[in-house]
Amino acid sequence: MTAVSSRHLAFRREIIATCRQLGALGLNQGTSGNVSVRVADGFLLTPTSLDYEAMKPADIVHVRADGTCVGARRPSSELPFHRAIMDARPDVRAIIHTHSTHATAVSCLRRGIPALHYLVALFGGADIRCARYATFGTDALSRNLVRALAGRRAALLANHGLVVVGDNLAHALSLTVEAEQLARLCLATLATGVKPAVLGPAEMARVAKRFRAYGYRPVP
Ligand code: 13P
């Protein structure tokens, strides 16, 4: 590994471990999805189109604060939205994008995940929104996503997948698992054909207050 690519070695290894965990959990496969983590000078991002099983620390791209990319590989095609989120949300330290089945299925309905379950409050509000459709890798998708993520830790991408943000990679991974489970619950509820009861804003505010008492940090 060159001196440049050995910088942030622990973070590079953690990104690869996270990508492989996403595969093992059935949340991503092959080369789908991408992962980034903030560092002192910009952020680290997975390269485009490289199988996670083959990925090595030197393959991770360093996107510097001035926008330049350092590394032997091309960055993920979703560099625009990773950069847009890192710029718009100083609270975010890690980003995980998946094409997990249930979240993507809800995104194909072009609707968000309502508060069918109180755990939706983990994501910062009374729903997980769905960002308006735009082609992958475009600035339009970045704008739609940043808007859908306002005050939230996750958003669906219409006909595409899920984006989760967190305080670190472990936090983002646990929220990704939870968001996929909430999407599965949403589909199961819709499949009954019966109109579900959705928890209202007052109850979700109570849940958020209790979460804070248990030490969960609100989304700024
Ligand atoms: P990359 O391999 O370019 O990161 O693309 C994967 C993906 O999921 C695009 O949305």
Image (cartoon, helix red, strand yellow):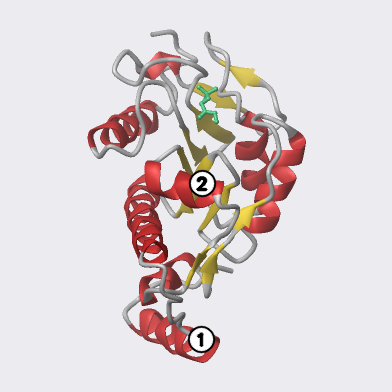
Relative side of 189 to 159, left or right: left
Examine the rendered structure and indicate whether residue 82 appears above or below residue 216. Answer: above
Q: Is the N terminus in the top left, top right, bottom left or bottom right quadrant?
A: top left
The vertical placement of 186 against 77, above or below, is below
Q: Nearer the viewer, mark 2 or mark 1?
A: 1
Picture coordinates of residue 63, whole percent (x, y): 60, 27
Tell me whether the residue at label 2 lies in contact with that at label 1, contact meaning CB atoms closer than 8 angstroms: no
Q: Amino acid at mark 1?
A: Gly
Query: Element at badge 2?
Result: strand
- The location of residue 115, given as percent across then percent down, is 46, 74
For the point 51% across and 30% down, which residue is it? 44
Mark closest to the chain's N terminus, 2 or 1: 2
- Mark 2, Cα crowd under 10 Å, few <14 / some 14-19 / many 20+, is many
> Does residue 13 appear left or right of residue 89 in this picture?
left
- What residue appears at the point 52 percent right and 18 percent down from the top-left corner? 48
* Residue named by callout 2: 163
Query: For this view, does 166 lie left or right of residue 184?
Result: right
In percent of width and height, residue 175 lies at 37, 55
Q: What amino acid is found at the position of numbered circle 2 in the picture?
A: Val
Between the C-alphas of marks 2 and 1, the distance is 24 Å
Q: Is residue 195 above or below residue 200?
A: above
Instruction: State which quadrant residue 82 falls in.
Output: top right
| Residue annotated with mark 1 | 200
Q: Is mark 1 within 8 Å of ligand 1?
A: no
The answer to which image quadrant residue 43 occupies is top right
Helix, strand or loop at label 1? It is: loop
